[in-house]
Amino acid sequence: MTRRLFRILAALGLAASLSGFAAPAHAEKRVALVVGNNDYRNVPKLLKAVNDARTMGDTLKQLGFSVMVAENQNRQQFSETLLAFDKAIEPGDTAFFFYAGHGFEIAGQNYLLPTDVPAATEGQEELVRDASILADRIVERLQNKKARTSILVFDACRNNPFERKGTRAVAGGGGLAPMTQLPEGVFSVFSAGPRQTALDRLSNDDANPNSVFTRTFARELLQPGENLVQVAQRTRRLVSEMADTVKHRQVPVYFDQMVDDVFLSGMAKDAAARPAEPPQKLAALPPVSVPQMPREETINAPIASFSRHNGGWSVTFSFADPTLGISWRMAGKGDFRETGFIDTLDPRTRKRMPNPSIELPPDAQAGTIEVRYVDQSGEMQGPFPIRFDPEAALIRDQRKMLDMTSTSWLSFREFNGLLVYYTHLVSYRCAIREVRIGIDTAVPNQVLKMPPCDMRDPGAITVGMPLYMKLAPSTQSVSVELTYRDGSVSEIKSFRSANRSHN
């Protein structure tokens, strides 16, 4: 089977790139697949996708990745390449997938187009689906391989490749739809936001061989001491500023479901300034040895979720192991404090369950929470460091609430005319960068101004704060699109006024 696989890869020109994967790995490693498609047969060709893939391949090699570079892949070659990528990934690895080429969205699902995708017209959506690679399936495959960290980058936000003069195009959109429902451990980046197109160049005099996004993202990846979120944020700002110089709107977006900070190029810049905290781990490298670490089979560190309320912060810990007791402290500040118990029996230990939650004051400063627990055999495990960043935690918590309660973003009331209330959005405004609405149109085309966020009392609604707007009595619907603080964009939600229902 291995010989047959390498014969296939040799035919694709990939065997040399895969040679580094042949030896069995004994530790977590970094593996990457970069794909660039230029030479489309039935839809417009591209100029820079192959160059983008090569640049990303060179960049990832500098970051310690074993890299496969695949160019101009037809459907069968693309499938065989993904199979080879599957075989290179082992549990605990960091997997990086980069795609440059045509992408297409149909009914909210993203498809990566091989070079032999057929031309399609109205009513032929299934033709495109069957001939393309479903992006969600790549995420699923990486999850099945138990990659600890999965990074997916798509420079595919171009015009609709199926548009033809004199014909009706297949129903869908050029570029890709937001991937908001990602599993834990997955980080995705898109070269442009929904309904935006990505620039290959800034002008006719722009001789750079790479797209505006890839040239920027590749450079930022090599910046030492920047985690993935910081890389994505800097890329978004720089690309947006460059696009603005030619009066074009292109704002890259990212979606973060990482549990830990991930650094691909060195440690955090301020690591040396924080000697009291344990060193942060590099993605997919063996854990740093720390004295008095618990036994290997019980080193499952807890994770924490943060929730802001009027009285301060609630922090809830989740443990993989059964626990008999939990204690905590802010790093370097006093003794450990027990969390106590709740009136519930843990069926695994047949004892009262330790309280998994703690409270922090509303003005709690950024820092590290140290958590330890007593395992089922009575031994103390930890302490484990959990980073607390109030601003980031607040934004993430409010973003989650907005996603869960999207049917409540707007409400209507008849009072001396028609009023539309957006109190719900004001309550969670700290997670929102911009609200756009469209009145009797499915395209949000005007900005709804929101009050500023007050980190000291983020949910406060004060006297005089605008909470509604008056609409013409004939208004039938209002569409809403949110741009979150991290640059990601929500789906467009439509709220109907005629029967006070929404979808």
Image (spheres, grey):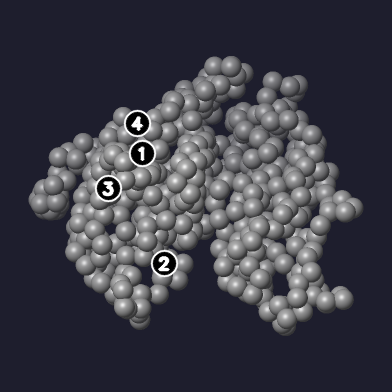
Q: How many numbered circles does the render carry?
A: 4
Give the residue pinned by disc 3: 48
Can residue 344 be seen here?
no
Q: Residues within 10 Å of mark 4 (few under 14, many from 20)?
A: some
The numbered mark, 4 or 1, whose residue comes first in the sequence reads 4
Q: Nearer the viewer, residue 387 or 60?
A: 60
Q: Which mark is residue 63?
A: 4
Is 304 left or right of 364, judged from the image as shown? left
CA neighbours of label 2 inside 10 A, class few (<14), some (14 to 19), many (20+): many
Q: Tell me residue 221's x, y (percent).
A: 41, 34
Q: Which residue is mark 1?
A: 215
Q: Which residue type does callout 4 highlight? A: Leu
**What is the distance, in whole Å, between disc 3 and disc 4 at their CAs?**
23 Å
Report how far apart the C-alphas of labels 3 and 2 lie in the structure: 21 Å
Residue 137 x/y as whole percent: 37, 60
**Mark 2 sits on what residue?**
173
